[in-house]
């Protein structure tokens, strides 16, 4: 097999480094590398972007937009891990399991936006239920989530791993309290909601892994439904998908002790969806690795789809 040329713009960041890890042992990829001295040099970056078959952007939004403008070679295919292009209809949204149309657009597109980590968990639950008419587009959806501190970037990671850190870093910390989280636009747009959800994220004192939860009060839903109905809709939606698994209603690992840990998928590209509840209320949970299916794993999966090879290549 002829090797494809891949450049990672921003490979020194957490997502870039994790993509590099997932490329270890792959003989179908030739990595184009930039020197440390030139990594912020637009001319050198432009040279490597245009010499590549695929370029990953692991950059802040403004830098990602600049990088796209540097791509003058019409054959270069870009996979952007930033927030910049996720709601741009000209870009493919990089969550192939959402629908056959999403997978086909990723396969054919030259511009793919990798989903956000919280957004991936939220959309995995809400998108199928809006599509099925269970959640009305105007429904006041709420969501809360917990995540490891690796999603906070280099500065945040350093704060958590500082031996002299403040006591507050030992407890879960709520943030984006003004309902201004950068994933909200994506969560609304991709799910098909008329209004942004009420979102309460928390960062916690462990490295990686997350759970995104969506509570539903049955009497407020657009259709009369049950826990079993919701589970059946989600199970059918993700039937035959390798990375997204809807767990059994009687999932023993949870029901045996009553706890759902957030870090058990750390290091993998898997996502697990859980359905809990009773006659009045339903709790939906999506568990994933914020650095895996929520970032670098999803990016590599998109590359595999675009290359037309097994989506599992380089991923677990």
Image (spheres, rainbow, N blue to C red):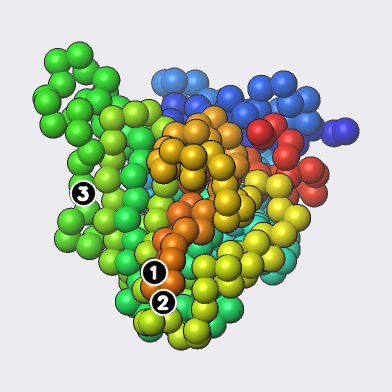
Q: Looking at the picture, how far across and down is residue 130, in whole percent? A: 51, 76
Categorize mark 1 by other alpha carbons within 10 Å: few (<14), some (14-19), many (20+).
some
Sequence-first disc among 2 and 1: 2
Give coordinates of residue 73: x percent, y percent.
64, 50
Look at the picture and state if 279 lies above or below 44: below
Look at the numbered disc 1 and give the secondary structure of its residue: strand
Left or right: residue 214 versus residue 17 is left
Does residue 27 appear to the left or right of 233 in the view shown?
A: right
Expressed as whole percent of the image width and height from the top left, the position of residue 59 reads 42, 41
Name which of mark 3 and mark 1 comes first in the sequence. Answer: 3
Residue pictured at 25% horizontal, 25% vertical: 160
Disc 3/disc 1 C-alpha distance (Å): 26 Å
Q: Which mark is residue 218?
A: 2
Q: Are marks 2 and 1 in contact (CB under 8 Å)?
A: yes
Q: Which mark is residue 281?
A: 1
CA separation, marks 2 and 3? 28 Å
Task: Identify whether 92 is placed above or below 252.
Answer: below
């Amino acid at each position: 097999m002829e090797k494809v040329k891949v450049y990672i713009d921003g490979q020194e960041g957490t997502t870039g480094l994790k993509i590099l890890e997932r490329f270890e042992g792959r003989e179908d990829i030739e990595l184009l590398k930039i020197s440390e001295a030139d990594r912020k040099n637009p001319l050198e970056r432009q040279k490597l972007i245009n010499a590549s078959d695929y370029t990953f952007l692991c950059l802040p939004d403004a830098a990602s937009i600049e990088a796209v403008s540097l791509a003058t070679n019409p054959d270069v295919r870009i996979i952007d891990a930033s927030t910049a292009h996720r709601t741009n209809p000209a870009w493919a949204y990089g969550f192939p399991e959402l629908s056959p149309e999403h997978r086909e657009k990723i396969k054919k597109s030259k511009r793919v936006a990798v989903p956000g980590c919280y957004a991936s968990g939220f959309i995995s639950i809400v998108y199928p239920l809006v599509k099925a008419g269970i959640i009305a587009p105007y429904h006041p959806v709420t969501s809360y989530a917990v995540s490891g501190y690796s999603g906070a970037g280099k500065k945040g990671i350093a704060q958590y791993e500082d031996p002299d850190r403040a006591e507050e870093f030992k407890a879960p910390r709520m943030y984006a309290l003004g309902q201004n989280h950068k994933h909200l636009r994506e969560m609304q747009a991709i799910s098909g909601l008329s209004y942004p959800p009420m979102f309460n994220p928390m960062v916690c004192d462990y490295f990686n892994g997350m759970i995104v939860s969506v509570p539903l009060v049955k009497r407020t839903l657009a259709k009369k439904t049950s826990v079993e109905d919701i589970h059946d809709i989600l199970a059918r939606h993700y039937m035959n998908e390798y990375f997204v698994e809807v767990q059994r209603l009687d999932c023993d690992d949870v029901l045996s002790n009553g706890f759902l840990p957030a870090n058990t998928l750390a290091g993998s590209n898997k996502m697990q969806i859980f359905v809990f509840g009773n006659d009045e209320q339903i709790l939906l949970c999506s568990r994933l690795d914020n650095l895996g299916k929520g970032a670098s794993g999803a990016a590599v999966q998109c590359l595999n789809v675009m290359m037309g090879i097994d989506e599992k290549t380089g991923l677990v």
